[in-house]
């Protein structure tokens, strides 16, 4: 395979990442020089993310077929383009959700680390070489470990950061060993060249399968799929809530970007790993939803809910088709805006009440009707109810699985949707039916939070009522991967 030579136009492909580096430098300069109100650090970060998204849309759109650039290290295609927009959007919303959170909201170094995590995710999305991919993944991972344990005065935060680091480092090491096996038997590190070598035969199937298993360990950790999910509940509960929102959405989406790039582009010639991923999808959905039923803490409930949603997204992936990959991408779009909205409400409520217990949400609809409405929209979307984005997200992944002949997996998924609907409605019952406690007053919603929740709620409704154009976009991206 011949790679395109360097051209000045290739700089446009990584223009967003260069702009993000400048944004991180700007935030750190503002912090050190104290040239503005420290609360403006978060606003600058969020506005910077949104501005770079606009720049990306204007100047960094890839050719329809995609191409390998920068010596074959990067594949500039529509899938990478969409994933990078998702990551930057999640970063912008997270920055807004951090504004009034003690210990992190006025720390320039925190926002710089957040930007660094997004840069790592962006390179994960369009890496075409396992070396580049691993470096990008570690850039994101180290930043996430630091953010999870950022609040040193909080024992739970410190514990979350340590657990995340220890488990994550182990999973990364196992994944790296899988990459070394592929390199050792093919002599290549470029994912697309590896695919050509495997298609030509000569590499024992057992070697490819072993490498696939090792890579799945690393990716399974990132997406919190069973049996690599054990870190998620403790880390999600202990980390600062905006960090939990970011890790549960953007980090999970980055894991699926890796999954698509390696298995659909690199290892598609030998698909003996497919039954394992199908089983993981079924078990992940089921365990996540069943354990969520017993949760009394809202962050732990959303943690197990997040595990279940990884299973739903895997249903689209294991269809191994353009429709399946498109449905996975659309599912991740809907999931990111929905889960960020849910955590946005959790942040505001915890700030006002100091509690993350579900029982304490009693009467929220009478204390803060608009906040309760945002929670209603988010939870019904997570449950897969129309006319919200989560409905079409589940519909598309199940349709792809049916087309692939995985009827039994769709039945398992449908049963899990019913289980999920139950515990989401339990929370909404507390919010809308249970009387509010004596003396409980209204919950203040700062302007930045109101803007973030408004954008997210509208996004959930748009993805549910005008799903066609967004799914067509995801379908075009899927064609580029294949």
Image: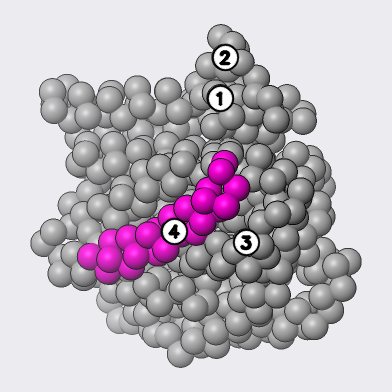
Q: Which mark is residue 351?
A: none
Disc 4 to disc 1, C-alpha distance: 24 Å
Q: Tell me which numbered mark, 4 or 2, is placed earlier along the sequence.
A: 2
**Which tag, 4 or 1, sits closer to the chain's start?**
1
**Residue position for label 4:** 177
User: Considering depth in this image, is 21 or 245 the residue closer to the camera?
Assistant: 21
Task: Say which residue appears at 61% left-offset and 51% top-offset.
Answer: 262
Q: Residue furthest top?
A: 8
What is the magenta segment's predominant secondary structure? helix
Q: Secondary structure at mark 3?
A: helix
Task: Quadrant for the C terminus, please.
Answer: top right
Mark 4 packing: few (<14 Cα in 10 Å), some, or many (20+)?
some
What residue lies at 71% left-to-right and 69% top-to-bottom?
Answer: 272
On screen, residue 257 versus residue 398, left or right, reads: left
Residue at the location (21% across, 25% down)? 30
Res. 208 mark: 3
Q: Which residue is mark 1?
A: 71
Residue 471 pos. (x, y %): 77, 48
């Amino acid at each position: 395979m011949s790679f395109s030579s360097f051209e000045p136009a290739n700089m446009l492909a990584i223009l967003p990442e260069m702009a993000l580096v400048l944004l991180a430098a700007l935030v750190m300069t503002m912090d050190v020089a104290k040239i503005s109100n420290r609360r403006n650090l978060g606003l600058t970060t969020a506005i910077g993310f949104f501005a770079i998204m606009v720049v990306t849309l204007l100047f960094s759109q890839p050719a329809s077929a995609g191409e390998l650039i920068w010596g074959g290290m990067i594949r500039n295609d529509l899938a990478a383009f969409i994933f990078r927009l998702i990551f930057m959007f999640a970063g912008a919303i997270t920055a807004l959700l951090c504004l009034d959170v003690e210990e992190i909201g006025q720390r320039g170094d925190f926002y710089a680390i957040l930007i660094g995590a997004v840069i790592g995710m962006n390179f994960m999305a369009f890496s075409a070489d396992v070396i580049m991919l691993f470096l990008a993944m570690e850039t994101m991972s180290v930043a996430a470990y630091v953010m999870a344990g950022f609040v040193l005065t909080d024992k739970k935060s410190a514990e979350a950061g340590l657990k995340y680091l220890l488990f994550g480092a182990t999973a990364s090491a196992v994944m790296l060993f899988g990459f070394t096996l592929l390199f050792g038997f093919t002599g290549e590190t470029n994912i697309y060249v590896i695919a050509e070598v495997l298609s030509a035969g000569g590499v024992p199937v057992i070697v490819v399968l072993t490498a696939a298993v090792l890579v799945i360990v690393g990716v399974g950790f990132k997406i919190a799929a069973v049996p690599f999910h054990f870190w998620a509940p403790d880390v999600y509960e202990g980390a600062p809530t905006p960090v939990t929102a970011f890790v549960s959405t953007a980090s999970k989406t980055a894991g699926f970007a890796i999954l698509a790039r390696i298995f659909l582009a690199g290892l598609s010639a030998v698909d003996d790993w497919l039954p394992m991923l199908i089983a993981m999808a079924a078990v992940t959905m089921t365990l996540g939803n069943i354990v969520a039923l017993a949760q009394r803490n809202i962050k732990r409930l959303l943690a197990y809910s997040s595990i279940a949603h990884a299973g739903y997204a895997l249903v689209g992936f294991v269809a191994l088709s353009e429709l399946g990959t498109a449905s996975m991408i659309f599912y991740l779009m809907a999931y990111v805006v929905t889960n960020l909205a849910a955590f946005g409400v959790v942040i505001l409520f915890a700030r006002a009440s100091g509690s993350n217990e579900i029982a304490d949400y009693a009467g929220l609809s009478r204390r803060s009707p608009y906040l309760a409405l945002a929670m209603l929209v988010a939870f019904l979307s997570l449950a897969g109810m129309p006319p919200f984005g989560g409905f079409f997200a589940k519909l598309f992944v199940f349709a792809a699985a049916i087309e692939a002949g995985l009827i039994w997996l769709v039945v398992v998924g449908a049963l899990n949707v019913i289980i999920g609907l139950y515990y989401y409605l339990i929370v909404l019952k507390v919010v809308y039916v249970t009387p509010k406690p004596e003396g409980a007053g209204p919950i203040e919603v700062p302007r930045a939070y109101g803007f973030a929740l408004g954008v997210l709620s509208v996004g959930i409704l748009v993805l549910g009522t005008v799903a066609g154009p967004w799914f067509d976009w995801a379908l075009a991206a899927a064609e580029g991967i294949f």
